[in-house]
Image (cartoon, rainbow, N blue to C red):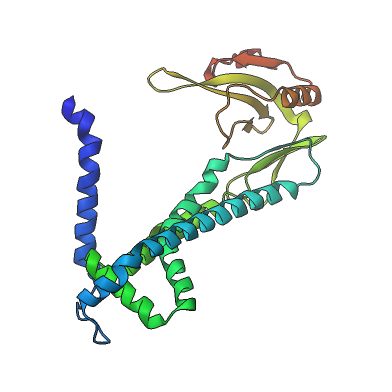
Amino acid sequence: MILYSFSPAILVPIAVAIAFALLRRYLAPGSPTLSHGVSMAELDSRFASMNWLIYLGMLLVGVIFGSVAYKSLVALNGLFAASEGPAYFRLLPSRSIWWFFPIFGALSLSWEITLFIWALFSKRQTVDLYIKWTSLKAGFDSTRTLRWMALLIALPTGVLTLLATPMHTTVHADEMRIRQYASLSSLKYRYKDARWMAIVKGFRERGGKFDGRAEILVKFADGYTWSSAANRDFTPTIDQKLVDFLSAKMNLPIQYAETESDLNLDQVH
């Protein structure tokens, strides 16, 4: 039990040590020889005192990059929903899903962006020497490492996140329009085709623990079941105005249950 309790604290530094060992083996900084007749001691004296400034620049670049990327994804998602035209309700996915690419992008790209900006106001030779110095100090090529991270992690995450931007549900006078992940068009479901409507409080995990996630469920004639909680944050209550609107439009009795599995669908006609 003690070993199990402390396993995360043990595994994290071990994983970091292994990662650094692999980087130093497969992404070595190359020849330790410095060009331009500059010694390592001279570079230590030159760059050690300004290293904090570069890291501060990376932090600022990362924050700006992440903020702009996040706000752009949120705005794009809103534009997809707005493209459906006037709607009584717009249900958008959880904003937390838009943070993955900004975070990975900031981590992998802030180094190169910072050095690019530095090179605009300084000699390229100075920037190149700094890159060489940091690689030799770290024992691996940090620039190549971050480029691989951008290619293998940030880029796929960005593509997958971008494909999620169309997701939304808009509620109109006679129908609801549902745009799913990576879909090219919206699914349109008319209220007259709804077969039953229910409100559940949450769901049970495999161990039986109950998790609160209130949602409205509507099943249509083709068998599709719409959930107001799909891709959204867990909330303990539902929007009563949305319930009243859908109930009036569908003219169906509402079932109430703790979970979807508790619904008595035999009573639905």
Q: Position of residue 93 (x, y in %)?
A: 60, 40
Which of the 4 image quarters holds residue 219? top right
Q: Give the residue at x 26% y 75%.
A: 43
Which of the 4 image quarters holds residue 252? top right
Instruction: Using the rendered image of the protein, determine whether residue 123 is visible from the camera's viewpoint.
Output: yes
Q: Nearer the viewer, residue 129 or 264?
A: 129
Q: Quadrant of the N terminus?
A: top left
Q: Give the residue at x 24% y 82%.
A: 38
Q: Quadrant of the C terminus?
A: top right
Q: Position of residue 128 (x, y in %)?
A: 35, 78
Is 246 located above or below residue 80 in the figure?
above
Q: Position of residue 149 (x, y in %)?
A: 37, 60
Instruction: Using the rendered image of the protein, determine whether residue 141 is visible from the camera's viewpoint.
Output: no
Q: Nearer the viewer, residue 121 or 6?
A: 121
Farthest-out residue, bottom: 36
Name the side, left or right, on which 228 lies relative to 244. left
Q: Give the residue at x 65% y 12%.
A: 267
Name the side, left or right, on which 209 lies relative to 189. left
The number of callouts visible is 0
Q: Position of residue 144 (x, y in %)?
A: 33, 69
Q: Nearer the viewer, residue 120 or 84?
A: 120
Q: Nearer the viewer, residue 191 or 82?
A: 82
Is 209 located above or below residue 108 in the figure?
above
